[in-house]
Image: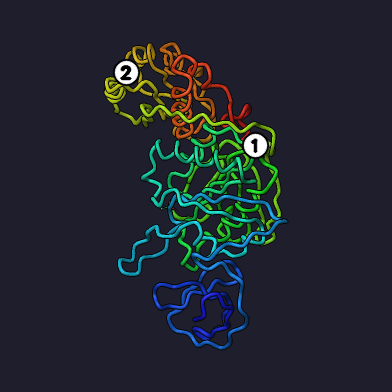
Amino acid sequence: MLTGKRVKIKAKGKIFEGIVMPSFTGNLVLKLDSGYNAGFCEYELIEVLEEVKTQIRGAEISKREDLPNVKIISTGGTIASRVDYRTGAVTSQFTAEEIISDVPEIAEICNVDAELLYNILSENMKPNNWIELARRVYEALKKYDGVIITHGTDTMHYSASAVAFMLSTPKPVVFVGAQRSSDRPSSDAAMNLLCSAKLSISDVGEVLVCMHGSTSDDFCYAHRGVKVRKMHTSRRDAFHSINAKPVARIDYPSLNVEWLSWRFKRGERDLKLFDKLEEKVVLIKFFPGLGSDLIEYFHSKGYRGFVIEGTGLGHVSTDWIETLKKICEDSIVVMTSQCLYGRICDRVYDTGRDLLKAGVIEGEDLLPETALIKLMFLIGNYGIEKAKKLVKINLVGEIESRSDY
Ligand code: GLU
């Protein structure tokens, strides 16, 4: 039984050294010193070098008094997945404890407790899941120095925004994911997790997303949860801060943190939870030819919060204006842009001015998804009229006062 031991092997004419990971396939899986896992079906064992004190699946995790305490809440996604060798599909199977046993270096940074909240792919997240997640993070923050949430990357920015609005946090709350599952040689899971562990014990007091900053294994970026977006289907550096600087750069493997844009420091805010979200809020992407009947349909179904992803500076076709005037009487309509980068300005062209007259609110430099979550949060907690006043006010770093980026 080699699991947990450090070995030297020869495969494909090369020498490899690493820690033997639990494997369900009969293949040898080695965690290399780079943090990556590599699988070998044909190899020659040269030497068993030493027994490594690694936290094997299910084993009790030993705590060190000199280290801060961090809670990992696992929700699923690729970071918690491995390839199902029967079907070839990537499925979610890992619990948070299993992730820790795959990345034993984390035990040098902090004491970790783990909680499996969900084991779902993030396209299956719903507003109720965000509420439950915010409640769990709130409880964890009473006891722990920081919280890490492992999450599927596809909708991580929605969840990060939801938690950022629902929770006033005095401590770091770090969302982390992976573009490649942890049993793949090119996995980004280990490095992302280690960088997020470093962030979770840092002096920041806000909700962040931590992912690869480049295609190499040299640094991660910490992005503000309300300013980040997945901009590539598969690259490991898919996450970008939009209309804002990243919050920090974490070098790997040194784990040195360079702060780029602070907002809230640790201890600056009191811990508070606002756990309501209005679900009848919709994000509609305008395209040439789309009629306003779609927005009327949602209104007839009781929706009172609308985010429009308009063209350019924030436009839809002029035949929407009369409908929007009616809708704005009892609803809130916020304009964002398909451009993503830049700021809404409906004072430049006639269409924009007519939209403003109809009651449409300029969404500043809000990402459309962040605007959606902000409306869910504002309507849920304060009602439509107050939401109309608060939507243009920066609450947690979702609106930058200047458009520098
Ligand atoms: N679609 C899945 C999700 O977002 C897998 C993608 C990922 O985690 O990167 O959960």
The residue depicted at 55 percent of the width and 58 percent of the height is: 215
- The disc, 2 or 1, on the residue closer to the chain's N-terminal end is 1
* SS category of the residue bearing label 1: loop
**Label number found at residue 170:** 1
Whether the residue carrying mark 2 lies under 8 Å from ligand 1 is answered with: no
Say which amino acid is labelled 2: Asp
Q: Is residue 68 left or right of residue 37?
A: right
93 w.r.t. 356: above or below: below
Q: Nearer the viewer, residue 279 or 258?
A: 279
Q: Nearer the viewer, residue 191 or 307?
A: 191
Q: Give the residue at mark 2.
A: 319
* SS category of the residue bearing label 2: helix
The residue depicted at 64 percent of the width and 31 percent of the height is: 270
Q: Position of residue 298 (x, y in %)?
A: 30, 24
The residue depicted at 67 percent of the width and 41 percent of the height is: 204
The residue depicted at 46 percent of the width and 14 percent of the height is: 385
Q: Position of residue 253 (x, y in %)?
A: 66, 62
